[in-house]
Amino acid sequence: MRYLIVLILSVLSIQISHSQINELGVFLGGSNFIGDVGATDYIAPNQFAFGGIYKWNRSKRHSYRASIIFSELEGIDTNSDDPRRIQRGYEFNSNILELSIGMEFTFVDFNLHSGTKVATPYLFAGISGAHHDNHYFLNGVQTNENASSWAFGIPMGLGFKTSFVEGFILGIEIGARYTFSDELDGSLPSKPENQPYRFGNINNNDWYMFTGITLTYTFGENPCYCFN
């Protein structure tokens, strides 16, 4: 019985040690918008994006992650390949603050305590909310509604990360955000009195992309596999 209790406590100690492996750092990169105004290129950063990121490495193959990213979304019709948009000539810009949580899955084991440099591709997905100002177009000019909304969505993407120097992880990632909103570019005014100025494809919601690098610092207790 005594040895059984010791074994159970040792297993619990391993799990607790694993749960204390954390990463905290920054995201730096760019953003681009995909909607009813501007170009529709999927990976074409045109505005600076920055923020913070936290990861809890639950195992060697998956992590929980949370991030906060600030950027400005911009759409310029004359940068599009669509002749109709070029002729229309609309432009918009809108500041967004995104909060997201999700999970990250690595292709191979990412053991931070192996004693050697490790690297792996990874996938991530989750849920997000982007706070933005509302606007619409009046005679082709972006007009503020003096209101703001949250655009909830699904972040998903892929990346590659590697242990950089002792205690630091360097990564590069591309992430798409599909939103449940069509208001980011002003094609769907939020106020009923501005609805006559609606335009664009009513069946497609807005997307935006973040492309950049992450640099995180790891901290927490190393896992112990000993039973003494």
Image (cartoon, rainbow, N blue to C red):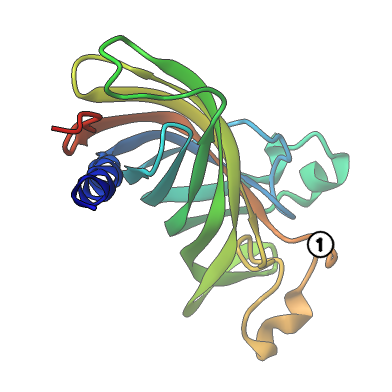
Q: Residue at x 58, y 32 (%)?
A: 158
SS category of the residue bearing label 1: loop
Q: Which residue is mark 1?
A: 200
Three-letter amino acid code of the residue under disc 1: Gly
**Residue furthest left in the image:** 228
Q: Quadrant of residue 28?
A: top left
> Residue 171: image x %, image y %?
40, 25
> Residue 142: image x %, image y %?
58, 64
Q: Is residue 223 above or below residue 117?
A: below
> Residue 119: image x %, image y %?
43, 16
Q: Nearer the viewer, residue 26 or 87?
A: 26
Q: Nearer the viewer, residue 138 or 11?
A: 11
Is residue 99 visible to us here?
yes
- Number of marks present in the image shown: 1
Q: Is 98 positioned to the left or the right of 2 in the image?
A: right
Q: Residue at x 54, y 30 (%)?
A: 122
